[in-house]
Image (cartoon, coloured by chain):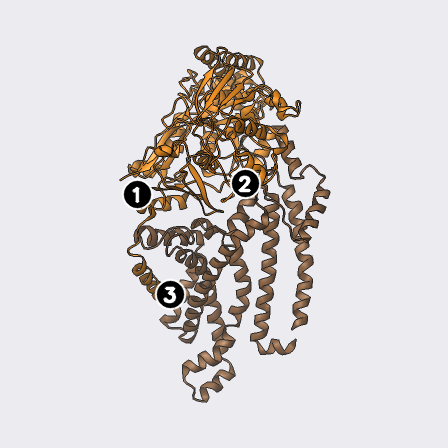
């Protein structure tokens, strides 16, 4: 077990370094620079700016300096927002993005696994068809459509919930969490239904039933653990996806999270910010994949014994 | 199943929030203005930042020698109570208000201005707006490192309350420049406490550190969420300030902003979504504001291109565009067709140039240049940055050129920075562009097309044009000056290095609770005149 984890971490480090190097050269290849603006900056000023940010040094020297700082955990200053370091900006946005992702995953887990389990137990009845149809719609419906629809109905038509913001008006976290969670709820519903169906046809379930256990005990005590394995292995990438992909929801609901910095940095050619956020997100994705692998190991007796 | 969960969630929500009052409703009593501010400001250092959101914030927190008149026209006194201008228009003496205070209680002195102007002109600060002070004697040389001693630059403190400024040329719009944030003073001790004079990354603009001299004070600053400013009791004109707080929200998504306004979370929006504007006009939405704005939407022509260097070709392109149709059928939000580069009505300047829509004349001009019915004319490219509005206009113009001139046109859209880079390096044929005036004077437009101006970008260099602007700006008499500027404008339209399309309007939504808010060309709404009342 420990060996597996250590091995994965050992692989992760060079991966992150490669991501950093690739990103460094890719953003430099993109036309346009951080200080280009519609109102042209006089050449003298541009020279001064490049000198301030060490952009006048040869690219390879800049690369060396950047990597040396990176190893010490320093992402450098933001070009777009003078006076802010990339690290500061990441850690301003991160708690918000985490919180949003956390609520979204809870919404997704509760709605998704409930619907999936019930659909599996009552397969080929209305209780199966209706939630699964809704789940199919949920997967197909993009958040940029669902979000505004929810806002229009609950925020503007019913005037029951704030249409935007985070932590500033009561109830302003509800709609973004549902919006972000919905697509994942749909996935989880389908995954848990499939997992449950497979588990319910296993021999040990028949044994449990033969023992005369009540149906709810069969499902909760025996079937759930096996039935939800696909969901758990999906959760790792899902959490990483939620954090990295919350940009749309953050924009629709005016949430001060990390996703907006990430995308805007690319438009602004804020080199250090693009690098910082990319490296940070790739680390997160690697980390969550590792976590879900470990969880799967713990839940599945066969996988456990093999290691 | 899912429906049941949603329904129960909804029930909890509705029961818990039924007595909620929207921020706009609550604001009347507290005098809190909720302001849609476009995007997250780069920062709050007036010598470093460049954008419009920053402008909104800085006019409330800091103050220059003058402030923009909310009803348009000549600037009003700011830190300077009054001023004398010498006969030749080159020497200004400003008498500072003795009650002007920094937010920490220190007096605002003439030395503060000298030091602050030295700061923005310090090359190693890398300010992007030093040219706003290039009108001062010696300023340009100091900024370019040709002189090292700042005492040779034309600004000096006679005593604590008198500031003397010497200019290179009589500059009739100089007083108007002084309400621009690049000329604002900064508090020397505070800046130096958190860094050096040329430190871009100094922490002095953070809440708690920030010291400035405007009607409002920085209270909190939460990245990408909001900036709250509160009334500054030490401001010299604090009795007039009626707002207690302004909350600036960096809402970059237009649709989100629109929904926030409709739900009572904003008093004023930054824009109206493109697709909503015609609907709001049709429904006579009482909150919709469409106001004249000092900006021109135009197409830049690369005059170094082998075909487009021919003046007649450029004229043919310009005459083949039906501007009226574009504003009525395509942009559809109150824009006015433009027939000059400078928008009409800028500080009393009314250009009399004309750009006819005349396909026949256009065809014959093209034929004279050797492209009878567009034959042999290479495929023309229109470059624009990715945005629905630009695409629609480019499509319309593509069709007009194809129909009226028989030439084929291709559209090329690029990400903003790529588009800028291609314009800068002259890697384009026709490119869409916009220009918004920095101050209310035709010079802010016409100056950009002089040779050697970075914002020219067309490759067009005309000595006569340059000479006319030179003469215009060396005279101190307004009517004579406008005569020369008008002549330059006519020359420009005869040569057509840029093809004007329409004059911008400011379109936004404003709650009827907001009073003391007047339309003006530069869209500057000074917070000290604004209050809320229902």
**Label 3 is found on which chain of the structure?**
B
Q: Nearer the viewer, mark 3 or mark 1?
A: 1
Q: Nearer the viewer, residue B288 or A142?
A: B288
Q: Secondary structure at mark 2?
A: loop
The 10 Å Cα crowd at callout 3, few under 14, some 14 to 19, many 20 or more, is: some
| Residue B341 in view of the camera | no
In the picture, the quarter occupied by the N terminus of chain A is bottom right
Characterize the local packing of mark 1: few (<14), some (14-19) or many (20 or more) Cα atoms within 10 angstroms.
some
Q: Residue at x 66, y 49 (%)?
A: A22
Q: Residue furthest bottom?
A: A211
The residue under label 2 is B204
Task: Return the residue nearer the eye: B438 or B259.
Answer: B438
Q: Which chain is orange?
A: B
Q: Which residue is mark 3?
A: B2
Q: Earlier in the sequence, mark 2 or mark 3?
A: 3
Identify the mark at residue B28; answer none if there is no mark: 1
């Amino acid at each position: 077990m420990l060996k597996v984890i250590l091995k994965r971490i050992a692989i992760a480090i060079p991966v992150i370094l490669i991501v950093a190097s690739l990103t460094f050269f890719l953003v430099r290849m993109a036309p346009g620079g951080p200080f280009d603006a519609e109102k042209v900056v006089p050449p003298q000023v541009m020279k001064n700016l490049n000198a301030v940010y060490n952009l006048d040094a040869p690219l390879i020297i800049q690369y060396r300096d950047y990597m040396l700082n990176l190893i010490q955990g320093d992402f450098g200053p933001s070009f777009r927002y003078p006076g802010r370091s990339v690290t500061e900006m990441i850690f301003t946005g991160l708690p918000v993005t985490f919180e949003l992702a956390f609520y979204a995953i809870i919404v997704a887990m509760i709605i998704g696994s409930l619907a999936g389990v019930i659909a599996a137990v009552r397969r080929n009845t209305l209780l199966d068809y209706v939630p699964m149809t809704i789940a199919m719609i949920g997967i197909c419906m993009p958040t940029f459509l669902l979000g505004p629809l929810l806002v229009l109905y609950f925020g503007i038509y019913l005037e029951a919930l704030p249409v935007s913001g985070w932590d500033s008006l009561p109830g302003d976290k509800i709609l973004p969490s549902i919006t972000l969670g919905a697509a994942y709820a749909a996935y989880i519903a389908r995954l848990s239904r499939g997992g449950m169906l497979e588990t319910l046809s296993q021999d040990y379930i028949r044994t449990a039933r033969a023992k005369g256990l009540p149906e709810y005990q069969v499902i909760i005590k025996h079937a759930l653990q096996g039935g939800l394995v696909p969901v758990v292995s999906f959760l790792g990438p899902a959490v990483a996806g939620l954090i990295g992909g919350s940009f749309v929801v953050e924009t629709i609901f005016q949430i001060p999270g990390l996703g907006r910095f990430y995308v805007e940095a690319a438009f602004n050619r804020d080199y250090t910010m693009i690098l910082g956020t990319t490296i940070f997100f790739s680390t997160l994705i690697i980390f969550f994949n590792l976590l879900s692998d470990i969880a799967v190991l713990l839940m599945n007796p066969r996988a456990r014994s093999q290691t | 199943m899912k429906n049941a969960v949603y329904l129960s969630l909804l029930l909890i929500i509705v029961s818990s929030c039924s007595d909620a009052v929207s921020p706009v409703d609550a604001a009347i009593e507290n005098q809190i203005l909720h302001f849609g501010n476009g995007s997250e400001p780069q920062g709050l250092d007036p010598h470093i930042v460049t954008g419009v959101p920053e402008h909104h914030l800085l006019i409330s927190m800091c103050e220059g020698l003058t402030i923009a008149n909310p009803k348009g026209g000549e600037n009003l006194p700011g830190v300077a109570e009054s001023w004398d201008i010498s006969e030749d228009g080159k020497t200004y003496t400003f008498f500072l208000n003795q009650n002007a205070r920094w937010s920490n209680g220190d007096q605002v002195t003439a030395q503060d201005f000298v030091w602050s102007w030295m700061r923005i002109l310090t090359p190693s600060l890398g300010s992007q707006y030093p040219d706003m002070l290039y009108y001062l004697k010696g300023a340009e040389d100091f900024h370019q490192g040709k002189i090292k001693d700042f005492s040779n630059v034309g600004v000096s403190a006679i005593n604590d309350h008198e500031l003397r400024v010497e200019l290179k040329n009589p500059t009739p719009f100089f007083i108007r420049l002084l309400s621009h944030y690049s000329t604002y003073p900064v508090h020397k001790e505070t800046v130096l406490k958190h860094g050096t004079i040329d430190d871009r990354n100094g922490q002095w603009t953070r809440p708690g550190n920030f010291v400035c001299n405007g009607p409002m004070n920085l209270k909190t600053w939460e990245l990408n969420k909001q900036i709250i400013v509160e009334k500054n009791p030490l401001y010299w004109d604090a009795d007039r300030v009626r707002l207690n707080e302004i909350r600036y929200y960096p809402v970059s998504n237009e649709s989100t902003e629109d929904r926030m306004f409709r739900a009572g979370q904003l008093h004023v929006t930054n824009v109206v979504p493109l697709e909503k504007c015609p609907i709001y006009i049709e429904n006579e939405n009482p909150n919709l504001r469409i106001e004249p704005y000092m900006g021109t939407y135009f197409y830049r022509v690369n005059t170094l291109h082998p075909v487009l260097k021919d003046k007649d070709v450029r004229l043919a392109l310009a005459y083949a565009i039906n501007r009226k149709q574009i504003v009525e059928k395509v942009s559809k939000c109150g824009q006015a067709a433009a027939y000059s580069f400078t928008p009409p009505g800028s500080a009393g300047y009314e250009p009399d140039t004309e750009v006819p829509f005349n396909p026949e004349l256009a065809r014959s001009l093209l034929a004279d240049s050797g492209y009878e019915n567009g034959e042999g004319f290479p495929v023309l490219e229109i470059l624009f940055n990715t945005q629905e509005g630009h695409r629609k206009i480019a499509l319309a113009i593509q069709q007009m050129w194809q129909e009226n001139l028989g030439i084929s046109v291709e559209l090329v859209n690029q990400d903003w920075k790529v588009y800028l880079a291609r314009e800068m390096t002259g890697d384009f044929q026709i490119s869409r562009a916009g220009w918004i005036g920095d101050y209310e004077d035709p010079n802010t437009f016409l100056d950009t097309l002089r040779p050697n101006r970075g914002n020219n970008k067309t490759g067009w260099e005309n000595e006569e044009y340059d000479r006319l602007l030179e003469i215009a700006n060396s005279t101190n008499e307004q009517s004579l000056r406008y005569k020369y500027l008008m002549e330059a404008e006519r020359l420009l339209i005869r040569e057509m290095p840029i093809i004007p399309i329409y004059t911008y309007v400011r379109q936004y939504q404003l709650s009827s609770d907001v009073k003391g808010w007047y339309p003006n060309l530069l869209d500057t709404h000074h917070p000290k005149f604004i209050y809320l009342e229902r």
